[in-house]
Image (cartoon, helix red, strand yellow):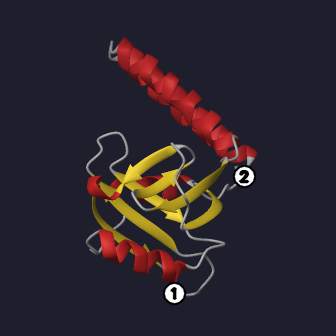
Amino acid sequence: MPRTAILEWEGREYDHNPKSTDWYWALGIVAVAATIASVLFGNYLLAILVVIAAVALALHAAKKPPIHRFRLVEQGIMIGDELHPFERMTSFSVLEDVEGEFPPMISIKTESWLSPHLIIPLEGVDADAVYAYFLHHVDEDEHHHTFSDLVAAWLGF
């Protein structure tokens, strides 16, 4: 079903920070140490989980994020072909960098258990227009960084 876009832009989910060889070595050393400790304590399931997590983390660190197409439509916001309706959104906040190094982002909290917190870059679009449109449809609230956001930043993601 075609939806006419009020605003349309493209952006990456996150900035790609290439990891150094030392970063991968550190990940491997920590993973091997945790795996050996798990085996020594007889926790084989944890050892397997550590190996899988380390491989997944290394693969995620190596890939560049894809470019997503965002469209603001009457019913909500579309990310690619997936619609996130205003009715399922609980609050939003526009996050701006004080120094102006990074583009503004819109943080959206939803009722969806698969994607409860969306962060969408507003680069290449009028952030004030997006803010004004959201203000008519969703409650504005102050959003703080989640624990997973802080861990991802600490790991360089």
Q: Residues within 10 Å of mark 1 (few under 14, many from 20)?
A: few
Q: Could you tell me which residue is drawn at 40 percent across and 65 percent down?
A: 107
Marks 2/1: CA–CA distance? 25 Å
Q: Is mark 2 on a helix, strand or loop?
A: loop
Q: Residues within 10 Å of mark 2 (few under 14, many from 20)?
A: few
**Residue 11, position as x, y percentages in the image:** 64, 60
Q: Which three-letter amino acid code belongs to the residue tagged 1?
A: Val
Q: Residue 21 sits in which quadrant?
A: top right
**Residue 44, position as x, y percentages in the image:** 38, 12
On the question of residue 155 being in view, the answer is yes
Q: Could you tell me which residue is drawn at 27 percent across and 56 percent down?
A: 87
Instruction: Check disc 2 and report the residue beneath it.
Output: 18
Instruction: Check disc 1 and report the residue beneath it.
Output: 98
Q: Which of marks 2 and 1 is nearer the N terminus?
A: 2
The label on residue 148 is none
Q: Which of 41 and 130 is in front in this view?
A: 130
**Residue 78, position as x, y percentages in the image:** 50, 52
